[in-house]
Image: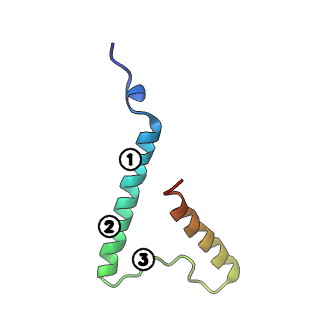
């Protein structure tokens, strides 16, 4: 008896694969832009303290999702 696709590939493996693909594309794009002299990371560079705080928290969440 053949198992359905959902049982053959658990969702956590699928989610991990999607995250790996997403971050690979993102990091390759960032590396290619850096070679051209383009600053990709603009989050947290503003002077307004409220915006700076929100942007810093967003960048921490973006990086923190990887080990989570």
Q: Secondary structure at mark 1?
A: helix
Residue positioned 57% across, 63% down in the render: 61
Q: Earlier in the sequence, mark 1 or mark 2?
A: 1
Q: Position of residue 33 (x, y in %)?
A: 33, 76
Residue positioned 39% across, 32% down in the render: 9
Residue that extends furthest to the front in the rendered view of this protein? 67
Quarter holding residue 26: bottom left
Residue 48 lies, with reference to residue 27, above or below; the image says below
Closer to viewer: mark 2 or mark 3:
2
Q: Are marks 1 and 2 in contact (CB under 8 Å)?
A: no
Q: Earlier in the sequence, mark 1 or mark 3?
A: 1
Residue at mark 2 to residue at mark 3: CA–CA distance: 12 Å
Closer to viewer: mark 1 or mark 3:
1
Residue positioned 29% across, 82% down in the render: 36
Residue at mark 1 to residue at mark 2: CA–CA distance: 16 Å
Residue 28 lies, with reference to residue 13, above or below; the image says below
Is 46 positioned to the left or the right of 7 in the image?
Answer: right
Residue positioned 50% across, 78% down in the render: 42
Per the image, the residue denoted by label 1 is 17
Residue 50 lies, with reference to residue 20, above or below; the image says below
Residue at mark 1 to residue at mark 3: CA–CA distance: 24 Å
Q: Are marks 2 and 3 in contact (CB under 8 Å)?
A: no
Crowdedness near tag 3: few (<14), some (14–19) or many (≥20) residues, C-alpha within 10 Å: few
Q: Earlier in the sequence, mark 2 or mark 3?
A: 2
Quick one: quadrant of the N terminus? top left
Per the image, the residue denoted by label 2 is 28
Q: Secondary structure at mark 3?
A: loop
The number of numbered badges drawn on the structure is 3
Crowdedness near tag 2: few (<14), some (14–19) or many (≥20) residues, C-alpha within 10 Å: few
Per the image, the residue denoted by label 3 is 40
Q: Position of residue 45 (x, y in %)?
A: 56, 83
């Amino acid at each position: 008896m053949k198992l359905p696709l959902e049982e053959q590939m658990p969702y956590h493996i699928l989610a991990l694969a999607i995250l790996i693909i997403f971050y690979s594309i993102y990091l390759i794009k960032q590396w290619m832009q850096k070679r051209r002299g383009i600053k990709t990371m603009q989050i947290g560079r503003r002077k307004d303290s409220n915006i700076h705080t929100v942007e810093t928290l967003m960048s921490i969440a973006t990086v923190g999702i990887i080990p989570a």
